[in-house]
Amino acid sequence: MAVTQTAQACDLVIFGAKGDLARRKLLPSLYQLEKAGQLNPDTRIIGVGRADWDKAAYTKVVREALETFMK
């Protein structure tokens, strides 16, 4: 049975946002939830890491991770 409920809005903080766990598991899972309409539109995903990234650079990292690790 598929779950079709949308979760309550929240702030999700990913520590090590450019790390292996985030790229292989967390980002693809969040993408799938968003694609299925299960993330509340008011949910904020906040990536924290040691490097100083701007939005465009991190968006590129996320895109590459999704292309590599989506099954």
Image (tube, grey):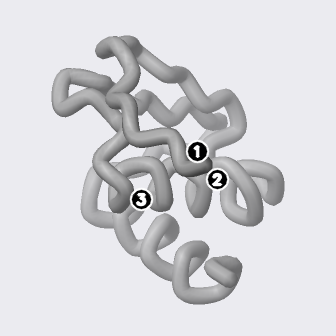
Judging by the rendered image, the residue that carries numbered circle 1 is 51
- In the rendered image, residue 39, in percent from the top left (x then y), is placed at 35, 36
Answer with left or right where residue 64 lies relative to residue 11: right
- In the rendered image, residue 17, in percent from the top left (x then y), is placed at 61, 43
Residue found 50% across the figure and 69% down from its top: 61
Contact check, label 1 and label 2, Cβ < 8 Å: yes
User: Which one is nearer the viewer's eye here, 51 or 13?
Assistant: 13
Judging by the rendered image, the residue that carries numbered circle 2 is 18
Which is nearer the N-term, disc 3 or disc 2?
2
Residue found 67% across the figure and 29% down from its top: 15
- In the rendered image, residue 32, in percent from the top left (x then y), is placed at 49, 59
Contact check, label 3 and label 2, Cβ < 8 Å: yes
Amino acid type, mark 1: Ala
Disc 3 to disc 2, C-alpha distance: 8 Å
* Number of other residues with Cα within 10 Å of mark 1, as a class: few under 14, some 14 to 19, many 20 or more: few
Amino acid type, mark 2: Lys
Q: Is residue 11 above or below residue 59?
A: above
Secondary element at tag 1: loop
* Residue most extreme to the left: 41
Amino acid type, mark 3: Tyr
Judging by the rendered image, the residue that carries numbered circle 3 is 58
* Residue most extreme to the front: 1
- In the rendered image, residue 67, in percent from the top left (x then y), is placed at 54, 86
Residue found 64% across the figure and 53% down from its top: 18
Locate the C terminus and report the quarter of the image it occupies. Answer: bottom right
